């Protein structure tokens, strides 16, 4: 019942996500920027989405799973093992910290980011680019991306604020 509430909230917040997409997991965490943005990470089969509200401004990140090129465990301040760094094929990097169960989130991401695995092992970005079979995986997953609407593709992977007066309030790293 509670999960149904989160699934409904997920689709209200992230309208680029197709309505048939079912929410798998929700985690409380913070997006590392100039400041920590405390919010929730929503994970479905094809999307990783983050939502935070900072001083009345909605901050949203939508990452299509097929655009993820690297998932790496991250230590906050180089000491606390509670974060994950996600790098997209564009080079854009998102670091999520304050995860109470980082390893379980990492395992979920490894399971859904199947294009990053060869023989059951996760690939680094360098290995991914050098792995000959990864090219066929990219073309297989490209068909999935093409099936999304043009509007979804334009909004995918971008950091959005719903307050148009401050659309550049947060900068991409």
Image: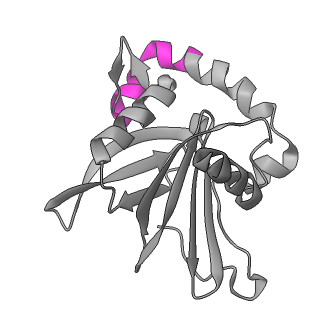
Residue at the spot 48% in from the left edge and 12% down from the top edge: 133
Residue at the spot 81% in from the left edge and 31% down from the top edge: 147
Prevalent SS, magenta region? helix
Q: Position of residue 87 (x, y in %)?
A: 45, 48
| Above or below, comparing residue 76 to residue 84 in the picture | below
Q: Position of residue 60 (x, y in %)?
A: 63, 65
Left-right relation of 34 to 19: left
Residue at the spot 78% in from the left edge and 53% down from the top edge: 154
Magenta segment includes 129: yes
Q: Which residues are magenta?
A: 124-136
State the residue lying farthest toward the front: 1
Residue at the spot 81% in from the left edge and 37% down from the top edge: 148
Camera-side residue: 22 or 117? 22
Residue 15: name its quadrant.
bottom right
Q: Position of residue 149 (x, y in %)?
A: 86, 42
Magenta segment includes 134: yes
| Above or below, comparing residue 148 to residue 157 in the picture | above
The quadrant the N terminus occupies is top right
């Amino acid at each position: 019942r509670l999960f149904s509430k989160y699934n409904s909230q997920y689709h209200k917040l992230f309208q680029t996500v197709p309505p048939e997409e079912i929410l798998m997991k929700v985690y409380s965490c913070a997006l590392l920027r100039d400041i920590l943005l405390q919010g929730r990470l929503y994970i479905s089969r094809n999307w990783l989405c983050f939502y935070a509200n900072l001083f009345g401004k909605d901050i949203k990140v939508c990452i299509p799973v097929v655009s993820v090129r690297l998932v790496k465990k991250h230590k906050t301040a180089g000491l606390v093992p509670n974060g994950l760094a996600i790098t997209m094929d564009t080079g854009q990097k998102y670091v999520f910290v304050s995860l109470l169960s980082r390893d379980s989130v990492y395992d979920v991401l490894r399971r859904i980011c199947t294009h990053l695995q060869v023989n059951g092992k996760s690939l680094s970005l360098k290995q991914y680019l050098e792995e000959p079979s990864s090219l066929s995986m990219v073309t297989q997953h490209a068909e999935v991306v093409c099936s999304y609407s043009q509007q979804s593709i334009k909004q995918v992977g971008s950091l959005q604020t719903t307050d148009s007066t401050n659309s550049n309030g947060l900068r991409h790293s």
